Amino acid sequence: MNIALDTNILVYFEAVNTPEMTARTIQIIQSLRHERLFVATQSMGELFHVLVRKGGLTRKEARERVNFWCSATHVVESSLSVLNNAMELAVSHQFQIWDSIILAAAVNANCQMLLSEDLQSGFTWDGVTVINPFADEPHWLLRALLENQDK
Protein backbone atom coordinates (compact mmCIF):
# COMPACT_ATOMS: atom_id res chain seq x y z
CA MET A 1 0.00 0.00 0.00
CA ASN A 2 1.39 3.40 -1.00
CA ILE A 3 1.35 6.03 1.73
CA ALA A 4 1.79 9.77 1.37
CA LEU A 5 3.18 11.85 4.21
CA ASP A 6 1.95 15.37 4.89
CA THR A 7 4.42 18.08 5.87
CA ASN A 8 3.47 17.96 9.54
CA ILE A 9 4.53 14.31 9.77
CA LEU A 10 7.97 15.21 8.40
CA VAL A 11 8.22 18.21 10.72
CA TYR A 12 7.43 16.08 13.78
CA PHE A 13 9.99 13.48 12.68
CA GLU A 14 12.57 16.27 12.46
CA ALA A 15 11.93 17.17 16.12
CA VAL A 16 10.24 20.51 15.49
CA ASN A 17 7.66 19.80 18.20
CA THR A 18 7.49 18.04 21.54
CA PRO A 19 9.80 15.09 22.22
CA GLU A 20 6.71 12.88 22.69
CA MET A 21 5.34 13.78 19.25
CA THR A 22 8.74 13.21 17.68
CA ALA A 23 9.11 9.79 19.32
CA ARG A 24 5.61 8.77 18.22
CA THR A 25 6.24 9.93 14.65
CA ILE A 26 9.56 8.10 14.43
CA GLN A 27 7.86 4.94 15.68
CA ILE A 28 5.15 5.20 13.01
CA ILE A 29 7.55 5.96 10.15
CA GLN A 30 9.91 3.16 11.14
CA SER A 31 6.95 0.75 11.12
CA LEU A 32 6.19 1.51 7.48
CA ARG A 33 7.89 0.15 4.40
CA HIS A 34 10.06 2.99 3.13
CA GLU A 35 9.73 1.93 -0.51
CA ARG A 36 5.99 2.68 -0.20
CA LEU A 37 6.36 6.22 1.17
CA PHE A 38 5.57 9.24 -1.01
CA VAL A 39 6.00 12.95 -0.35
CA ALA A 40 4.79 15.85 -2.49
CA THR A 41 7.27 18.44 -3.73
CA GLN A 42 5.02 20.95 -1.95
CA SER A 43 5.82 19.24 1.37
CA MET A 44 9.55 19.37 0.68
CA GLY A 45 9.35 23.14 0.25
CA GLU A 46 7.22 23.52 3.36
CA LEU A 47 9.61 21.34 5.36
CA PHE A 48 12.58 23.48 4.30
CA HIS A 49 10.72 26.60 5.41
CA VAL A 50 9.72 25.16 8.81
CA LEU A 51 13.18 23.77 9.53
CA VAL A 52 14.72 27.21 8.98
CA ARG A 53 12.00 29.37 10.58
CA LYS A 54 10.90 27.22 13.52
CA GLY A 55 13.58 24.55 13.75
CA GLY A 56 16.48 26.97 13.85
CA LEU A 57 18.49 25.13 11.21
CA THR A 58 20.67 26.96 8.74
CA ARG A 59 19.52 26.88 5.14
CA LYS A 60 22.33 24.45 4.37
CA GLU A 61 21.25 22.12 7.21
CA ALA A 62 17.62 22.35 6.09
CA ARG A 63 18.66 21.51 2.52
CA GLU A 64 20.49 18.43 3.82
CA ARG A 65 17.39 17.26 5.73
CA VAL A 66 15.15 17.81 2.69
CA ASN A 67 17.65 15.92 0.54
CA PHE A 68 17.51 13.08 3.06
CA TRP A 69 13.72 12.87 2.65
CA CYS A 70 14.06 13.07 -1.12
CA SER A 71 16.35 10.03 -1.05
CA ALA A 72 14.34 8.11 1.58
CA THR A 73 10.94 8.48 -0.12
CA HIS A 74 9.42 8.87 -3.55
CA VAL A 75 8.93 12.55 -4.32
CA VAL A 76 5.78 13.35 -6.27
CA GLU A 77 6.38 16.34 -8.48
CA SER A 78 3.73 18.95 -9.01
CA SER A 79 2.27 19.09 -12.46
CA LEU A 80 -0.54 20.87 -14.23
CA SER A 81 -2.71 17.81 -13.61
CA VAL A 82 -1.93 17.88 -9.88
CA LEU A 83 -2.66 21.63 -9.78
CA ASN A 84 -5.97 21.24 -11.62
CA ASN A 85 -7.06 18.43 -9.31
CA ALA A 86 -5.96 20.46 -6.29
CA MET A 87 -7.99 23.45 -7.42
CA GLU A 88 -11.03 21.22 -7.90
CA LEU A 89 -10.55 19.84 -4.40
CA ALA A 90 -10.14 23.34 -2.96
CA VAL A 91 -13.32 24.52 -4.68
CA SER A 92 -15.49 21.48 -3.97
CA HIS A 93 -14.35 20.83 -0.38
CA GLN A 94 -13.06 24.24 0.74
CA PHE A 95 -9.54 22.97 1.53
CA GLN A 96 -6.54 25.27 1.47
CA ILE A 97 -4.80 25.08 -1.91
CA TRP A 98 -1.50 23.94 -0.36
CA ASP A 99 -3.18 21.02 1.43
CA SER A 100 -5.08 20.26 -1.77
CA ILE A 101 -1.83 20.04 -3.75
CA ILE A 102 -0.48 17.50 -1.27
CA LEU A 103 -3.65 15.40 -1.46
CA ALA A 104 -3.78 15.65 -5.27
CA ALA A 105 -0.12 14.56 -5.45
CA ALA A 106 -0.99 11.54 -3.29
CA VAL A 107 -3.73 10.65 -5.77
CA ASN A 108 -1.28 11.09 -8.64
CA ALA A 109 1.14 8.66 -6.94
CA ASN A 110 -1.60 6.03 -6.50
CA CYS A 111 -1.43 6.27 -2.73
CA GLN A 112 -4.24 4.80 -0.68
CA MET A 113 -3.45 6.79 2.45
CA LEU A 114 -2.27 10.29 3.36
CA LEU A 115 -0.95 10.57 6.90
CA SER A 116 -1.79 14.05 8.15
CA GLU A 117 -2.73 15.74 11.36
CA ASP A 118 -4.03 18.80 9.53
CA LEU A 119 -6.72 17.46 7.23
CA GLN A 120 -10.02 15.84 8.16
CA SER A 121 -9.19 12.29 9.27
CA GLY A 122 -11.30 9.74 7.45
CA PHE A 123 -11.90 11.99 4.45
CA THR A 124 -11.49 10.03 1.22
CA TRP A 125 -10.94 11.62 -2.16
CA ASP A 126 -10.26 9.78 -5.39
CA GLY A 127 -9.06 6.66 -3.57
CA VAL A 128 -6.88 8.37 -0.94
CA THR A 129 -8.01 8.34 2.68
CA VAL A 130 -6.64 11.00 5.01
CA ILE A 131 -5.60 9.47 8.33
CA ASN A 132 -4.44 11.20 11.48
CA PRO A 133 -1.80 8.80 12.84
CA PHE A 134 -1.97 10.50 16.24
CA ALA A 135 -5.68 9.96 16.85
CA ASP A 136 -6.54 8.30 20.15
CA GLU A 137 -8.28 5.53 18.22
CA PRO A 138 -6.17 4.63 15.16
CA HIS A 139 -8.02 4.52 11.85
CA TRP A 140 -8.69 0.91 10.87
CA LEU A 141 -6.66 1.24 7.64
CA LEU A 142 -3.54 2.36 9.48
CA ARG A 143 -4.03 -0.17 12.25
CA ALA A 144 -4.37 -3.00 9.71
CA LEU A 145 -1.31 -1.81 7.81
CA LEU A 146 0.86 -1.62 10.92
CA GLU A 147 -0.33 -5.04 12.11
CA ASN A 148 0.51 -6.58 8.72
CA GLN A 149 3.96 -4.93 8.67
CA ASP A 150 4.87 -6.89 11.80
CA LYS A 151 4.19 -10.23 10.09
Image (cartoon, rainbow, N blue to C red):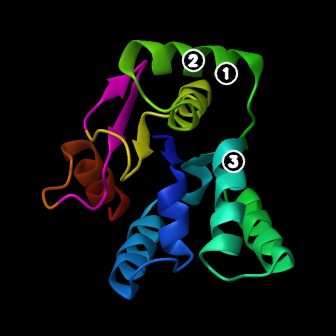
Q: Quadrant of the N terminus?
A: top left
Of the pair 14 and 38, the residue shown nearer to us: 14
Q: Which residue is mark 1?
A: 83
Task: Give the extent of the magenta segment.
Answer: 122-135
Q: Position of residue 83 (x, y in %)?
A: 67, 21
Q: Which residue is mark 3?
A: 74
**131 in magenta:** yes
Give, as a three-letter code, the residue at label 3.
His
Q: Quadrant of the C terminus?
A: bottom left
| Residue at 35% across, 38% down | 130
Give, as a three-letter code, the residue at label 2.
Met
- Tag 3 secondary structure: strand
Q: Which residue is mark 2?
A: 87
Give, as a three-letter code, the residue at label 1.
Leu
On screen, residue 2 above or below 132: above
On screen, residue 15 above or below 69: below
Of the pair 134 and 49, the residue shown nearer to us: 49
Front of the two marks 2 and 3: 2
Residue 32, by quadrant, is bottom left
